[in-house]
Image (spheres, rainbow, N blue to C red):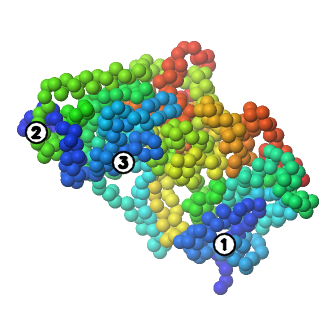
Amino acid sequence: MTECRPKLAVMKFASCDGCQLTLLDMEDELLTIARAVQISHFAEASSSLAPGPYDLTLVEGSITTREDRQRLTQLREDSKYLVTIGACATSGGVQALRNFGSHDEFMRGVYARPDYIETLATSTPIAAHVKVDFELRGCPVDKHQLLEVIASLLAGHRPKTSTESVCQACKRRGNVCVVVAQDMPCLGPVTQAGCGAICPAYDRGCYGCFGPTRQPNPKSLSDHLLRQRLGEVECAMLLHGINAYAPEFATEGQRLWELAGVPKPLHASLHSDEEGAQE
Amino acid sequence: MTATPEQLTIAAKSLWLDKKEFQSFLNVLREGGYQIIGPRIEQGAIVYGPVDRVEDFPLGWTDEQAPGLYRLKKRDDDALFGYAVGPHSWKRFLFPPQLDMMRSKKVGAGWDMEPVPVETVKYAFLGVRACELSAIEVQDRVFLNSTFPDEYYQQRRRDSLIIAVNCTMAAATCFCTSMDSGPRCRTGYDLALTELIDGYVVEVGSVQGATLIERLALPTVAAVQEERAEVARRQAVEQIQRVLDREHVQSTLKQRLNHVHWDDVAARCLSCANCTMVCPTCFCSSVEDVTMLVDQEVVRQRRWDSCFNFDFSHVSGGPVRDQTRSRYRQWLTHKLTTWVDQFGTSGCVGCGRCITWCPVGIDLTKESVILCSEAGLDKPQDSPL
Ligand code: SF4
Ligand code: SF4
Ligand code: SF4
């Protein structure tokens, strides 16, 4: 069969594979995707791995080693569209917590022989290194949004993913606000929707998996949570979670750590590229 | 809904529904083909959902409210309607949060488009407060009495029954007395109840209401019950502490577009849109075509939208209101002033939901006082975006 279907690649850097699993989990749609595109490289799904160029590359994971950085540069050259999927690829992921700590200390704490390990001192998002055509948020990404991205890019238009807050999804769903009715800390008001407000539906505050909204106001939210007697450390940890290195969460989290008397300076400046990712 | 002479006779006299008969009342509604939507407890609040039996109701519960705070509390009686208003409003049912409007399927080289038919449902809304009757009337102006009536809203509104409840208590966030919208139910209901410890005074407001209640053959209310009901209703009026100087705000706020206090609110506002979602009069929605990869199908979906969204005012070149300051200002000036120019009525009915359900407790009655003051008006007027 001669191939004229667009070539899809799914690539992984430092990550847990959860976002790729979202793609694999689409039992009903996967066959349709497979009919619409040629899946050239998807190690999680098949061992036949075709080299580039690719029409659409979905990138999971953050950059944490020198080799990955080189691999990414090549991948960008090989890809027509490069889309990041998930919090790791888009903001550095939970592993970006090391950007606020001592890399050496972590290495000594975790590995018996840290001298065998070669990594960068930081975990940085893909966009800190190469041009990204679209960033899909989430930890993990949402199946419907992922489909929207694939379908839109194949059809040649910009994916429609809302930048509204989680609160709106909460209200549409009919959830009762856990902050107002139960005094629970929740990142919903400063977090972009996408998950369908799952956590508040089960009496949990939002963990901020989809990262900051456009023009978020995390300071007002944490001031409120502090007034509700949440400790500074708890509040700081809430912001420095899955999307710790997303600029707005990073800055507000640092302000709170500072208030708690545990300053957490960054190794790397928030937006810089190679300089920031020092060894 | 004009009544015939003999039905008006029924309507003129209030009836007495004994507390023990309340289940029979629910049964009559059900037998009338209505799906009853009323108060029930979920996730620590009194919300609106399907109710069938007395036990479904928030028996003996009340709510305590403050800016950014809501708590359920036990009452010392077993009232069914002994609370104010919660996070839900009836707009969930008349103007649903999300609605599929049209499906398109790719057929050959073209598209087959089919509107999603309006599914007919007969709701009996049970426990509608005076401010909520006003809110429904405000939305009627938008969805019924406009150039483009909303079919879905039309059907729900036409076939639904409204059973109002006169408040006998108020929350600290209520200010219907300022907005001339309560707490006494005046029009817009089929039946209106005033709850007393042993039963309900029932007022009949329409033919449908009269026809239904007739089946219970209720006695006419005794004068002493009428008096007790009046005392109970007065209690709500007396409990209302919050005020908004409606006319002053209406005439002044538009002259305050450059007040420094807008920056102060913007420093606190999360632009999260909770206030617009819980507001019973807010009517904004957006329509989007959602692509389904499977079967090459496209679904046109309507969803509640909000002026607090960054993309809401997006036009070619970017969003018109690109800061929280301008978004909050748009919301408040529309609610309290330009709504009057547009629809001939205020966009606020004083239910207090936006105050309670704002996660950081921003209170429009407080903010509007400061915004209407002369102090802080040191910049020249700019464009009213
Ligand atoms: S529970 Fe969280 S996400 Fe939901 S409305 Fe409240 S603050 Fe917003
Ligand atoms: S603006 Fe606030 S108080 Fe007024 S009707 Fe809307 S939610 Fe109720
Ligand atoms: S006023 Fe309150 S509820 Fe409304 S957008 Fe601002 S923070 Fe959210």
B268 to B213, vertically: above or below: above
Q: Mark 3 falls on what kind of element?
A: strand
Residue A248, visible in the rendered structure:
no
Q: Is residue B193 left or right of residue A219?
A: left
Q: x, y (%) of residue A75?
A: 79, 65
Query: Mark 2 packing: few (<14 Cα in 10 Å), some, or many (20+)?
Result: some
Q: Is residue A127 left or right of residue B193?
A: right
In this picture, is B212 found above or below B232? below
Percent x, y of residue B28: 19, 49
Q: B16 or B242, which is in the foreground?
A: B16
- How busy is the neighbourhood of tag 3: few (under 14 within 10 Å), some, or many (20 plus)? many
List the residue tagged with mark 1. A6
Q: Mark 3 points at which residue?
A: B49
Residue occupying the far right of the picture: A115
For the C terminus of chain B, give its image quadrant.
Answer: top right
Q: Disc 1 or disc 2, which is closer to the eye? A: 2
Query: Which residue is located at x 45 percent, y 68 percent?
Result: B105
Q: Which residue is drawn at 11% across and 33% down?
A: B220
Element on which disc 2 rests: helix
Q: Where is residue A231 in the image (x, y as percent from the top left)?
A: 67, 35
Query: The numbered mark 2 sits on a residue in which chain?
Result: B
The answer to whether the residues at label 3 and label 2 have Cβ atoms under 8 Å apart is no
Q: Which residue is drawn at 66% across and 72% down?
A: A6
Q: Residue B7 carries which label?
A: 2
